[in-house]
Image (tube, coloured by chain):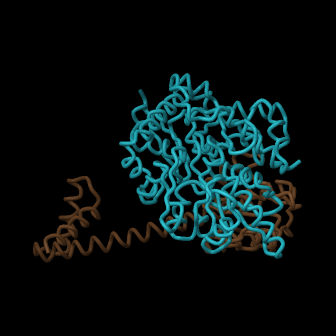
Chain colours: A brown, B cyan
Amino acid sequence: MDLTLKIVIVDESPVRSAIIEEGLREAGFSDVVRVAETANLLARIYAIDPDVILIDLENPSRDVLEQMFQVSRVVKRPVAMFVDQSDTASIQASVDAGVSAYIVGGLVKDRVKHILDLCISRFNAFSRLQTELDLAKTALEDRKVIDRAKGILMKMKKLSEDDAYSLMRSTAMREKKKIVEIAQSILTASEMLK
Amino acid sequence: MSERKLRIGFIPLADATALIVAVDKGFTTAEGLDIELVREVSWSNVRDKLNIGLFDAAHLLAPVAIASSLGLGHVKVPIVAAFGLGLNGNAITVSPPLYAAIKAQAEGDIADPMVTARALSRVVANRKAKGEDPLTFGMTFPFSTHNYQLRFWMAAGGVDPDQDIRLVVLPPPYMVESLANKHVDAFCVGAPWNSVAVDLGIGHILHFVSEILQRAAEKVLAVRARWADENPDAFRRLILAHGKAADFVEDVKNRDEVASILAAPERIGVAPEVIRRTLDGRLKVSPDGTFRSSERYLLVGRAQAARPDPVQAAWLYAQMVRWGQVLMSAESLAEAKAVFRPDLYDSILGPSAPMPASEPADGVGAFTGPAFDPDDIGAHLDGWKIRRR
C-alpha cells in the first residue's frame, strides 16, 4: 500500500468528508485534501494535482470531472474506477454507498482498492448515522405531537393522562393507524374548532 | 398479466417529457409496468447506473448512448435506443455584455447563426488583441449535443473552440448561477435553464439550437442491448407506453396538463408556465420581454421525432471524430449507427406518418456546409477547416 498517494475528497457535506479524511489518516494516508466548493472545481483539482479523487455520487460536479478525460493539454488523465469492469462487486458497493473514485495518472487499481473500500465503509457509516439521527428526530417530534394531543384530550374530556393515552391507542388500533397519526388529527381538529 | 417492476433514471429537463408523462399519466401502468423514476444529478451517474444494471432504462444524452456503445471515455456497454425522447430543445444563452459585443459586431440579422458566429469571431479577436482572458462557454458533458452544437456554430464563423475560447462542463443546475457570477460568458443547455437566466435578467437567448441544426437527436430512451434481448416483452411494452405518451404530449389541448405533470417538485420542479413555453416553442429571449417562436424548438413526437434515425447517430459520431474524441473507422461508424434502432421502433409502434415537407432532406439540416451524407463522413470532415487531427 502506497501511503504517499495524494487524495482529494470532493464533498459538499463537511461532516462526511471529515469522517472520510479521518479514516484515511488513521489508515496512514497523510496527504488528504478536502474540497467543498464546486466553483472552478477543475482548476482547483489541477492545482492540487492529486493521484486519487473521491467524489460523492450526489454531487452534480461529477460531470465536470468527466471533462478531464477529454482535455488533451493535461498530462495526467484521471480514469473512473468504474472503467475496470472486472470487479463488479466493488463497483456495486461503491454506487450503493454513494461514492465514486477517479484515479489519476495510470495508477494500478489494486493500489487504490484499499482506499475505495475504506471510503465505502465510511460512507455507509455516515449514512447509518444520518438515518439514526433522522429517526431520533422523528421520534422526538412524534413524542411532542402525542403529548400535545394528550393534553387536549385531558382538558376537553376531563381524562387522566393514562386514560387519554389509552383512548388514542385504542382508536389507533381500531383504525389501523399509528398513534401519532391519531394525535395529529386531534391537533388538526382542535385547531379547526378553535 | 403480472406487473413488471422497472427502475428508470432521468435528469430533470424538459426533454424527459415523454418518459415522465408515460409514467405519471399511467401509460406504463396500462402496459402492466410498475416504474420507479429516479431523479439523478449527473449524466455520469445516469450512465454508470444504467451500465452496471441499477437502472433498467434511462433518459440519456444521445451521444452518451453512442460513446458507451463504443467504449469511449468509459466502459464499453452496448446500448440500444429504440425510442427518441426528443429532437432539439437546447438554446445558446449569452451574458448581457457578450450579447452587446456580438450585436455591435453583427453584420446582418442577429437571428442568423452565421452572422453571430462571424461576430463572435471578431469579438474573440478583439479580446485577444487587448490581452483579455478568453471567453468561457459552459456545456453539459463532453459527449453532449450541447458541446457539438456550440462547436459547430462557432467554428463556422472561424472560432476554434479548443484554441480561441474555453469550453467547460457545468452541471445544468449550476449554469445560471455561473453566468450570474461571471464564471462563464455563455452556455448551451436544455430547458428550462435558458428561460430561467432570461427571467432573472442575466442572459439573452442568442439561438435556439434548431437554428443551427433543424434536426438534432437530443435524448434517447436507452437500455442495455443485453437487457433488451433478455426482456423483450417489458421492452416492447415500455416503447408502446412511450409512443402513447409522445402522442399525448403533442396534442396541444393536453399541454397545460403536461406542463403541470412536469412541474412537480420530484420531476422537473419549475413553474408550469416556464415548461409550457418550452413545449410551445415560444420563449422570452431577452430580459426586455422580446419573444421568439419556433415550430422546431423541441419536437417530442411530431415529424417522426421519436423514431431513432441512424443518420443522427452518424452525425454525432462525425462530431466525435471532428473534435478528436475518437479516431475515424468504418467499423465504429457502423457500430454508432446500429445504436439507433428504427427497425425496433417500427416493429413495436407500426409505420409512422410520412415525414412532413418541412423536414430537411438530409435528416440534419445544418445552417451551413453541404448536405450530410452518413455514408461519407470523410467528406463531411474535409469540408471543415477547423477540426482536430
- Residue A34 x/y as whole percent: 71, 73
Q: Identify the image quadrant of residue B219.
A: top right
Q: Identify the image quadrant of residue B216.
A: top right
- Looking at the rendered structure, the number of numbered marks drawn on it comes to 0
Where is B236 relative to B116, above or below? above
Q: Is residue B288 visible?
A: yes
Q: Is residue A32 left or right of residue B364?
A: right
Where is B269 relative to A92, above or below? below
Compare residues B315 and B131 and report the one nearer the observer. Answer: B131
- State the quadrant of the N terminus of chain B: top left
Where is B301 relative to A61, above or below? above
| Residue occupying image coordinates x 36% and y 72% | A141
| Residue occupying image coordinates x 73% and y 43% | B67
- Residue B44 x/y as whole percent: 67, 52
- Residue B172 x/y as whole percent: 60, 59
Q: Is residue B267 left or right of residue A90?
A: left
Q: Identify the image quadrant of residue A80.
A: bottom right
- Residue B220 x/y as whole percent: 60, 40
Q: Is residue B44 visible?
A: no
Residue furthest out toward the front:
B108
Q: Is residue A178 left or right of residue B209?
A: left
Compare residues B370 and A194 and report the one nearer the observer. Answer: B370
| Residue occupying image coordinates x 55% and y 32% | B304
| Residue occupying image coordinates x 87% and y 61% | A73
Compare residues B332 and A34 and report the one nearer the observer. Answer: B332
Q: Is residue A158 left or right of residue A61?
A: left
